[in-house]
Image (cartoon, rainbow, N blue to C red):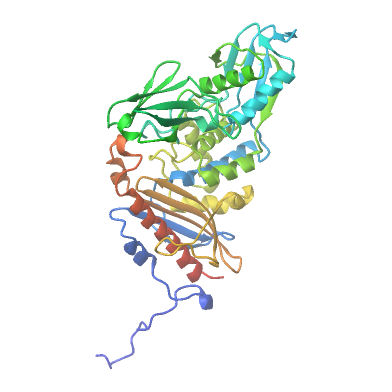
Amino acid sequence: MALASPPTVSVRPMPRPGGPGGRLYPSAESLVERAKLGSAKVGFAVADAATGTVLETMNPLLQQPPASVAKALTALYGLECLGADHRFATRLLATGAVEGGIIKGDLVLAGSGDPTLDTDRLADLAKLLKAAGVTGVEGDFLAWDGALPRIETIDPEQPDQVGYNPALSGLNLNFNRVHFEWRRNGSGWNVAMDARSARYRPDVRVARMEIVRRKYPIYTYEDSGETDRWTVASGALGQDGSRWLPVRKPTLYTAEVFQILARAEGVALPAAIPVRTLPSGAEIARVESDELRPILKDMLKYSTNVTAEAIGLTATAHSTAFPESLARSAEQMSSWIGRRIDSARPALVDHSGLGGESRISARDMVRALVTLGPGQNLEPLLKPIQMKDDKGRPLENHPVRILAKTGTLNFVSALAGYAIQPDGRRLAFATFVADPPRRDAIPREQRERPEGVRSWTARARTLQLRLIDRWSNVYTA
């Protein structure tokens, strides 16, 4: 039979698609198998970024958690609804005239949801208050946070102590984190809770820490009305150290820090009263954020959740109606994406990707990159990704340039963006790797550093880079 006729399929390996520029390369299926990701599901799509022609897929309609890749969608949403030149303003209003340095009424600290406001810029605002000739207030010190809804926590399924899961409001400061520091002092420790930035580190009382003699749990949190009360296990402290903890009362936190900074400028203010209705008054000082594009670039580089949520909520408030909840705002963004890419499938629960219930398919993510990305000039906002070998070592001078957004949750890894080949051709891609049942099985108190997630994530990342390497070699111009 071997001599009866020539084989209908060549027994020699054939070059994969891509013409003369292509070369032999492992199949996507073999790369997935080699990654040894257990029961995780892999979905990807890659297309020519200029034409939208789909080049290769695997489970392209599988709805997967995007993790922080969702921030790329939030960037598009924010640019569309707010404009690239949008700035967040934090203002001081006086409801009465200033006479002899005293405001004959109330002083209002009015936020706009600025996610980048820090202690340094708040200190600049206090200096402007002094420059306006104010030394005190006859009425109340009011803190207006009604520009955004009050969000108690981005994702209630996260451990209490993780700094990337704080509360939000129309007044935010230092990404709504407080710095907890401990220093060994004999048989005990000295502790401090402060709102540090580059130039200042004022101690605060709105967040308080107590050391308790125990080994576990390491942290506990209690809402004590006007303060965040934390305890930490003495057995976990060791010598000296520090970490950022989330702020659950951002309006009071921002107002307290401003009160401290104003006092340093000689302006005496009473304790702040939060209000949701903006009082009418004359503006006497303001500070502003950078324009939206550099804010988004930093958000995509550092993956700051507060920035994503504040921008998403603000975009919804400007484009449709005031969002009553984070989920409602995310629903509006999902609908906007769906309309623009002609899909009813995006289903996000927040703007940062922190919530594990968000879902989008690789096909829809690539459609967004191809359809919406060029119009908002998304590509230069994305982070350069270093190509690495199978052992995680950087490959210097690799011919393919990657601009993308990463996303990581426990047993969830995502990567989406653009791969620019040496000849200039751009590939738009999205790769989602996830094992939601394994993620959901982790007890809440162990979700900060669960066993096995680090090595799993490293293998998923390697798979994503090997897939990009494959596409860049196989699908040449």
**Which residue: 35% across, 34% down?**
237
Residue 193 in view, yes or no = yes
Q: Nearer the viewer, residue 281 or 42?
A: 281
**Which residue: 61% across, 65% down?**
424
Q: Nearer the viewer, residue 198 or 353?
A: 198
Q: Is residue 57 left or right of residue 120?
A: left
* Residue 72, position as x, y percentages in the image: 53, 46
Q: Is 234 rendered above or below residue 334?
A: above
Q: Quadrant of the N terminus?
A: bottom left
Q: Nearer the viewer, residue 263 or 65?
A: 263
Q: As drawn, which residue projects farthest toward the front?
A: 186
* Residue 442, position as x, y percentages in the image: 28, 40
Q: As drawn, which residue projects farthest toward the bottom?
A: 3
**Which residue: 27% across, 28% down?**
214
Quadrant of the rendered structure where residue 31 is? bottom left
Q: Is residue 429 left or right of residue 280?
A: left
* Residue 169, position as x, y percentages in the image: 52, 25
